[in-house]
């Protein structure tokens, strides 16, 4: 039987997959759900990473003002998860996107 953490991680990964296919309004709702899940599971590296991917997916469809806010959120997540190389990489990619706009 899967633990609650395993189920939440699978749910978070499903949300990331969903976010890669959504239009901006629905994508924002999905990322809000990922944010709530990440906040409730601060010690779960996989869920934190899923939230970072959701933020990255969101940033890909945003205009500059919203993009700046999303990158700021990613930066905060990266600062809170300094040991997570995957989140650091996602943040770096988002910063690159911001600097090219």
Image (tube, rainbow, N blue to C red):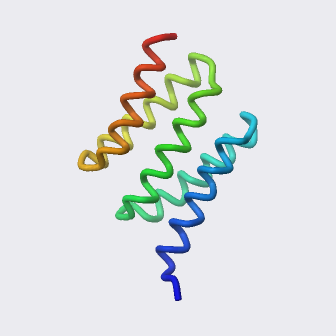
Looking at the rendered structure, the number of numbered marks drawn on it comes to 0
Residue nearer the viewer, 11 or 32:
11
Horizontal side of residue 79 vs 51, given as left or right = left
* Residue at x-position 44% and y-position 64%: 41
Depicted 37 relative to depicted 25: above or below: below
Where is residue 58 shown, x and y percent of the image?
60, 35
Q: Residue furthest left?
A: 83
Picture quadrant of residue 54: top right
Residue nearer the viewer, 86 or 38:
86
Q: Residue furthest top?
A: 101
Where is residue 91 shown, x and y percent of the image?
39, 33
Depicted 26 relative to depicted 100: above or below: below
* Residue at x-position 46% and y-position 29%: 71
Picture quadrant of residue 59: top right
Residue nearer the viewer, 63 or 6:
6
Depicted 11 relative to depicted 96: above or below: below
Where is residue 65 shown, x and y percent of the image?
57, 18
Where is residue 9 shown, x and y percent of the image?
51, 66
């Amino acid at each position: 039987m899967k633990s609650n953490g395993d189920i939440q991680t699978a749910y978070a990964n499903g949300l990331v997959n969903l976010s890669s296919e959504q239009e901006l309004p629905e994508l924002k709702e999905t990322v809000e759900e990922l944010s709530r899940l990440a906040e409730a599971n601060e010690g779960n590296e996989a869920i934190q990473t899923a939230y970072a991917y959701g933020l990255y997916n969101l940033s890909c469809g945003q205009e500059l003002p919203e993009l700046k806010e999303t990158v700021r959120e990613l930066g905060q997540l990266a600062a809170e998860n300094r040991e997570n190389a995957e989140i650091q990489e996602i943040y770096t990619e988002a910063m690159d996107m911001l600097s090219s706009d």
